[in-house]
Amino acid sequence: MVSRVVVTDVRDVVAGTLLALESDTAIGEAFNMVGPVPVAYTAAARLIADNTDRPYIDVKMPFYWGPHVSNEKARSMLGYKPQYSFDRMVETALAFKRGDTIDQIPN
């Protein structure tokens, strides 16, 4: 079994929070505002290694560890449509590092 991680981009969290604030059916509810799809740890590590000077090391873990969360409730009740996959988050981070204009406000 491949260990996966669910990541969330702040842009999706803001969009989902605005949907919840504008929805009467969201009152008293809790939602997972997570990204569109989980990403395998190995794919995430390779993507980062391929685009930076960080090394990639293949390690076999003797157990499975991964979160089990779903954004289905937010999708069905609020119309939540996360747009930012892990790949897009890395692209944004690399663009910021290069000094490119990005669609987030840097601190």
Image (cartoon, rainbow, N blue to C red):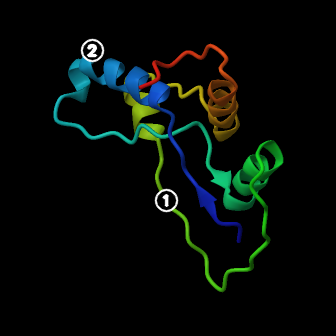
Pick out the residue farthest to the left: 28
31 on left or right of 97: left
**Which residue is labeled 1 in the image?**
68
Residue at (62, 13) in percent of width and height:
101
Residue 9 horizontal/vertical position (percent):
51, 34
Look at the picture and state if 91 lies above or below 47. above
Q: Tag 2: residue type?
A: Glu
Q: CA distance from mark 1 to mark 2?
A: 27 Å
**Amino acid tagged 1:** His
Q: Quadrant of the N terminus?
A: bottom right
Q: Badge 1 local density, few (<14 within 10 Å), some, or many (20+)?
A: few
Q: Position of residue 40 (x, y in %)?
A: 69, 57
Mark 1 secondary-structure assignment: loop
* Residue 48 % position (x, y): 73, 48
Disc nearer the start of the sequence (1/2):
2
Residue at horizontal 72 percent and vertical 56 percent from the top: 45
Q: Quadrant of residue 25?
A: top left
- How many residues crowd mark 2 within 10 Å: few (<14), some (14–19), many (20+)? few
Q: Residue at x 54, y 28 (%)?
A: 82
Q: Which mark is residue 103?
A: none
- Quadrant in the picture for residue 95: top right
Quadrant for the C terminus in the image = top left
Question: Dot 2 lies on which element?
Answer: loop
**In the rendered image, the vertical position of residue 107 relative to residue 38, given as above or below:** above
Q: Is residue 13 left or right of residue 2?
A: left
Q: On screen, 38 above or below 36?
A: below
Q: Label 2 belongs to which residue?
A: 22
Q: Quadrant of residue 24?
A: top left
Question: Along the line of sight, which residue is nearer the eye, 83 or 43?
Answer: 43
